[in-house]
Image: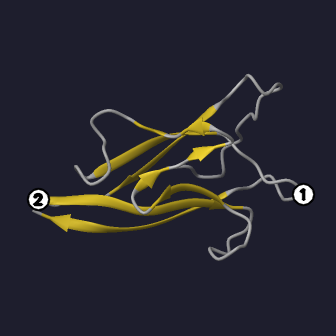
Amino acid sequence: MYQKPPFFDLGLNPDEVNFMYIAIRHLQPFLGASVQVLRLWGTPTADQDDINFYEIVADQCKQSVNGNPILEIDGYENGAGNTTRYVVPVFAFLNAPEVVFIIFVGHNWIF
């Protein structure tokens, strides 16, 4: 977990894609529980309803950022354990502060 927001390089040319890693996990996992991400998105403000956003996961399905796919890290598939991890192309919002807020909606499955 970060103590302050990290800085990500957007790259200097369109052919260069940099990635960030996002993990959602139980801080205190319990036997038989699984995290399932229903929606995951980034906004330029702390307002989860901001009209400007990048959809990372929608209806439990990975999206893409500027045509670049979002990947799940093997062994951490959505809904299959206590952690779900994504590799996401770095993005920013035009005419907005450098900070991007990542927001998620999910639920726990108990098997």
User: In the rendering, which numbered label is found on residue 95?
Assistant: 1
User: In the rendering, which numbered label is found on residue 107?
Assistant: none
Work out whether 13 lies above or below 60.
above
The numbered mark, 2 or 1, whose residue comes first in the sequence reads: 2
Q: Residues within 10 Å of mark 2 (few under 14, many from 20)?
A: few
Q: What element carries label 1?
A: loop
Q: Nearer the viewer, mark 2 or mark 1?
A: 1
Task: Tell me which corner region of the image, top left, top right, bottom left or bottom right, holds residue 73.
Answer: top left
Residue 78, given in percent of the width and then of the height, sits at 32, 50
Q: Which of 71 and 47 is in front in this view?
A: 71
Q: Can you identify the residue that label 2 sits on?
A: 32
Q: Which of 24 and 93 is in front in this view?
A: 93
* Residue 29 visible in the displayed image: no
Horizontal side, residue 2 vs residue 49: left or right: left
Q: Nearer the viewer, residue 69 or 98?
A: 69
Q: In which quarter of the image is the C terminus?
A: bottom left
Q: Which residue is drawn at 68% across and 62% down?
A: 53
Work out whether 83 lies above or below 44.
above
Residue 63, given in percent of the width and then of the height, sits at 53, 49
Task: Tell me which corner region of the image, top left, top right, bottom left or bottom right, holds residue 27.
Answer: bottom left
Q: Residue at x 26, y 67 (%)?
A: 108
Q: Which residue is drawn at 39% across and 58% down?
A: 60
Q: Is mark 2 on a helix, strand or loop?
A: loop
Mark 2: which amino acid?
Gly
Residue 106, given in percent of the width and then of the height, sits at 38, 67
Horizontal side, residue 54 vs residue 77: left or right: right
Mark 1: which amino acid?
Asn
* Residue 32 visible in the displayed image: yes
